[in-house]
Image (cartoon, rainbow, N blue to C red):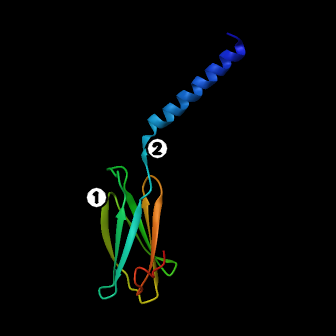
Amino acid sequence: MSEKLKRAVILSLVGIFTIFAMTSLCPTAVNAHAPQKALLAYDGATKTLSVTVTHTRFSEGHYINKVEIMKNGKVIAVQEYKGQPSETFTYTYKVDAVNGDILEVKASCNKFGSTSEKITVGMSPSKALK
């Protein structure tokens, strides 16, 4: 076997080993994923924002760790969490809003990614912002 061919084989094996080692030693980075969706509902009578988040394949070390709430583009609350109760769950927040206010929520995974959703207070869901 020529030196050039030996070198190519060795470099290929090193590359394959490196990829294998990275995916084996860092499985959370490979298996982590963003939340799938967030659904919002606002009850003007109780001034309560309900946020339903779906984040599957969660675990003790992989969960929704932060929910950020914005009103008309300004952050009004940030809630941090140490885990999540189930794949789909609902958190409620007291938010003072009036018709026409735009509420936006960003739910973040502690490992990778986030999802955001907006609603306009006082509009039917079919006419709300997407």
Residue appearing at x 40%, y 67% in the figure = 38
Earlier along the polypeptide chain: callout 1 or callout 2?
A: 2
> Residue 22 versus residue 129: which sits nearer the camera?
129
**Relative side of 83 to 21, left or right:** left
What's the CA distance linking mark 1 and mark 2? 21 Å
Residue appearing at x 42%, y 55% in the figure = 110
As drawn, 111 above or below 75: above
Q: Which residue is mark 1?
A: 86
Q: Which residue is mark 2?
A: 30
Amino acid under disc 1: Ser
Circle 1 residues within 10 Å: few <14, some 14–19, many ≥20: some
Check the picture and name the quadrant holding the N terminus. top right
**Secondary element type, mark 1:** loop
Image location (x, y in percent) of residue 78: 42, 70
Residue farthest toward the front in the current orientation of the protein: 126
> Residue 97 versus residue 126: which sits nearer the camera?
126
As drawn, the label of residue 55 is none
**Relative side of 107 to 87, left or right:** right
The part of the image, by quadrant, that contains residue 81 is bottom left
Residue appearing at x 45%, y 80% in the figure = 128
